[in-house]
Image (cartoon, rainbow, N blue to C red):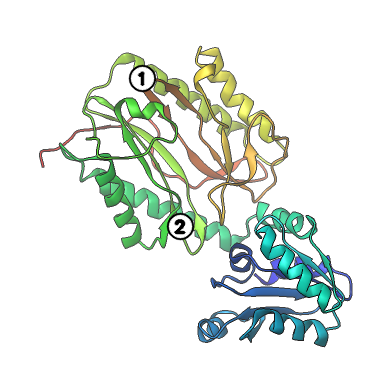
Amino acid sequence: MINKIKKLQNSLADGSAYLIISELHNFYLTGFKSTDGALLIDKNNAYLLVDSRYIEACELAVKHCKVVCFSRLFEGINEIIKSDNITTVYLEQDNLCVSASNAFCAKLEEAGVKAVSDNTLDKLLSELRLIKDENEKLKIQKAQEISEEAMLKTLEKLHKGMTEREFALELEYEMKKLGASEVSFDLITISGKKTSMPHGEPDESVIEDNSFFTMDIGAVYDGYHSDMTRTVAIGEVNQKMCDIYSIVLEAQLTALEMVKAGVKCSDIDKAARDIITEAGYGDYFRHSTGHGVGIEIHEKPGVSPSCDTVLEEGMVITIEPGIYLPGEFGVRIEDMVLVTKDGYHNFAKLPKELLGYELADK
């Protein structure tokens, strides 16, 4: 946390400050979650403003910022602006609604301060978030471990008549028992023909025997997300299903072999896409090969045909090719990996060969 704030301070001139209102970035920079607060960073100081609901917990948890309790937020901000002789304040755009941004700009200008609401601060925050520090990596790894253990525990409960929604609820319950604060997104636990829908939603449909079962899942641990997809066979599946699974697995492994610092994201996407296209299923791979993960489930960089971002050490991305045949079935295999100098560290430990499960009697 200290290093992140220091990096922002190093980009400031005397008399300038960054005002961060969004809950997302306040958490990212301080590790503390609150609503209706603000983080004001100038060249020499960082102030975390919270109201009386949070002050005790904040003072215990946050040691690298000056904690300020406010009754009216802008009055608290204005006092700091005056005491630190701040003349220019940069605001976020991406995580602040237009009305809030306009309101803060107006109040700052009334106080005689120049308000800058362009992409200066957003760009700096985006660049910071691209590279994960050691603490962030540990949280992402823990979130992944929770997901995997919860998935295995829930698969043990598979039984005849179990619905997709029932499985999703059991899975979320197991994640939270293991320490997750929440799930990364609405869990995708779908079977049969529904697996042809990349973002199909679990409902009261009974998990089908002799079909594929796709689980796209993730847990949040201390604000950081995990993301993983596994497709398994329930009962007996036919040769076409096995062949498609093999193609997707080859595409995923080929893309993973490309991952290392210095490689363009679009080249990794192409590696996976070429395998699937050459097998005759290019029209049925209907999304990008991956995306960044961190304090949000979808972050930069995108691993897509249009993303020319060059990978750097410390980035976290997913590799998740798929083939989706409408009215038949679909397959997706997804791992979340940390980019290293010479390759990658795979956060996922579960096997990727096609595994089979039986529906037990209830």
* Callout in the foreground (2, 1): 1
Which residue: 58% across, 73% down? Answer: 36
- What amino acid is found at the position of numbered circle 2 in the picture? Val
Is residue 201 positioned above or below 59 on the image? above
Question: Where, by quadrant of the figure, is residue 333 drawn?
Answer: top left
Confirm whether residue 181 shows in the render: yes
Which residue: 65% across, 78% down? Answer: 48
Crowding at mark 2 (Cα within 10 Å: few <14, some 14-19, many 20+): many
Which residue: 46% across, 20% down? Answer: 247
| 247 with respect to 298 (left or right) | left
Q: CA distance from mark 2 to mark 1?
A: 33 Å
Question: Where, by quadrant of the figure, is residue 195 drawn?
Answer: top left
Circle 2 sits in a helix, a strand or a loop, which is it?
strand
- What amino acid is found at the position of numbered circle 1 in the picture? Gly
Image x and y of residue 258, in percent? 62, 32
Which residue: 47% across, 46% down? Answer: 227
Is residue 341 positioned above or below 1 on the image? above
Is residue 358 positioned above or below 337 on the image? above
179 or 195: nearer the viewer? 195
Residue of label 2: 220
Say which quadrant the C terminus sits in. Answer: top left
